[in-house]
Image (cartoon, grey):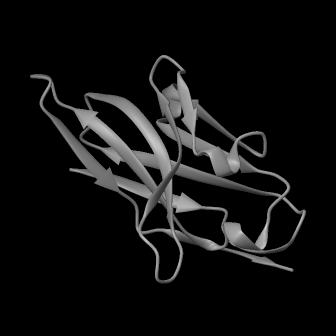
Amino acid sequence: QVQLVESGGGLVQAGGSLRLSCAASGSIFRIVSMGWYRQAPGKQRELVARITSDGSTNYADSVKGRFTISRDNAKNTVYLQMNSLKPGDTADYYCNAYVVDSKWRGMDYWGKGTLVTVSS
């Protein structure tokens, strides 16, 4: 089993910044990719940003130029630097990791989420 623990959410004014962190622990052979998703009230969960083990990234169009995802492979940790936050960024943010075992069988793992609230 793999556990993901997020931190860094909170309340911030529009235009402000927050940095989310997510640390993975447990039985890990290799983490193929890690990412952040978010879910606002009444909406579906959506991808915010994702990063692979070789550093390739992809972002939702709505956050490009404002958010930056990074990863520390040695610490099995992923970060999301969020700048120029908008009220529309308010949501529960969930960490995700796609982990493979020694036989390259993969599984998705999720954190419990951290709330980001952006006030206008």
Q: In which quarter of the image is residue 91?
A: bottom right
Across and down, in percent, residue 10 comes to: 71, 74
Q: So how many labels did they put on this image? A: 0
Furthest residue in direction top, as rendered: 54
Residue toward you, 83 or 109: 83
Across and down, in percent, residue 42 comes to: 46, 83
For residue 17, above or below residue 68: below
* Residue at screen point 69% across, 49% down: 63
Q: In this view, does 16 lie to the left or right of 33?
A: right
Furthest residue in direction front, as rendered: 61
For residue 38, above or below residue 108: below
Residue toward you, 2 or 49: 49
Residue toward you, 63 or 67: 63
* Residue at screen point 66% across, 51% down: 62
For residue 33, above or below residue 7: above
* Residue at screen point 46% across, 36% down: 76
Q: In the rendered view of the protein, which quadrant contains the C terminus?
A: bottom right
Q: Quadrant of residue 19?
A: bottom right
* Residue at screen point 51% across, 82% down: 41
Q: In this view, does 79 lie to the left or right of 96?
A: right
Across and down, in percent, residue 11 comes to: 76, 77
Q: Is residue 102 left or right of residue 85?
A: left
Q: Quadrant of residue 89?
A: bottom right
